[in-house]
Amino acid sequence: MSTTAPLSTGVPVSTSATATMAPAASFPSDVDWPALVVGAAEVTTGILERAAGADWSRRPTGSDWTARATLDHLALAVLGYAGLLTARPADRYITLFGSLDPAAPIPHCLEGLRIAGSLLAATVRDTRRDARAWHPWGESDGPGFAAMGVVELLVHGWDLAHAFGLGWQPPEHLAGPALARLFPEAPTGHGHADTLLWCTGRTALPGHPRRPAGEWAWDGRVR
């Protein structure tokens, strides 16, 4: 799996790989998860609008996808999390797959990502606290799927921004809660965005080499 392959599949991190890492700080119980999803969609699409006229057939470093295909993945993933929370299957993915119009210009595709983010946020807002749904990386709840959406948007947003030379870093206030929710064994002592990029195999941290593609996973289980 490439470093910018889907964030919703992969090989779980082994016990030996996590044994030397201190648990990340726990996230507050009053996190406004719907607002974080909308914020992640807005900030990510906002930076990518600066590259709207670029060549979207290029591939981010290490990716099997073009930049345009990465947008398709984001739409499918973020909308898919809303679908999982709605249908709440116990052992499978849902049968609804969201996609962007292949003929649409990039600004319209970015609008589609904002729509997907708003739909996920609304679904999280309307989902009971005790609701659970299947995910291959751990049965999860509303905050868990919101955090997944935030991670997808921020990390793939970083992939694309990096590919277009935009020099963008995910905002700390968005990366922090998602990092704490999905990567409880992440190393401490570093910025939230830097740690999130390390957790998802994008970059190295001091004392922590870059994780190989396909050898990381988040933990979506309810805590």
Image (tube, rainbow, N blue to C red):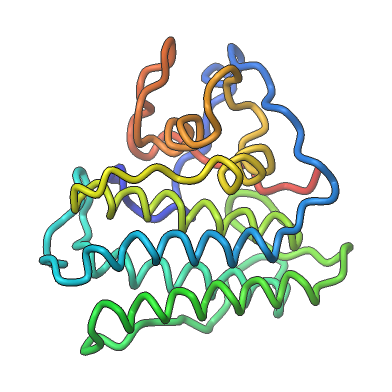
Image coords of residue 180 (percent x, y): 67, 37
Residue 113 appears left or right of 124? left
Q: Nearer the viewer, residue 73 or 192?
A: 192
| 33 lies above or below 68 | above
Image coords of residue 99 (percent x, y): 38, 82
Image coords of residue 20 (percent x, y): 58, 11
| 203 lies above or below 118 | above
Q: Quadrant of the C terminus?
A: top right
| 69 lies above or below 1 | below
Residue 4 appears left or right of 30? left
Q: Nearer the viewer, residue 178 or 6?
A: 178
Q: Nearer the viewer, residue 72 or 108?
A: 108
Q: Residue at horizontal 39%, vertical 42%?
A: 169
Q: Residue at horizontal 31%, vertical 63%?
A: 48
Image coords of residue 17 (percent x, y): 52, 20
| 55 lies above or below 30 | below
Residue 118 appears left or right of 9? right
Q: Residue at horizontal 83%, vertical 67%?
A: 131
Q: Tell me how many marks there are.
A: 0
Query: Residue 83 occupies which quadrant of the picture?
Result: bottom right
Q: Residue at horizontal 58%, vertical 48%?
A: 174
Query: Residue 105 occupies which quadrant of the picture?
Result: bottom left
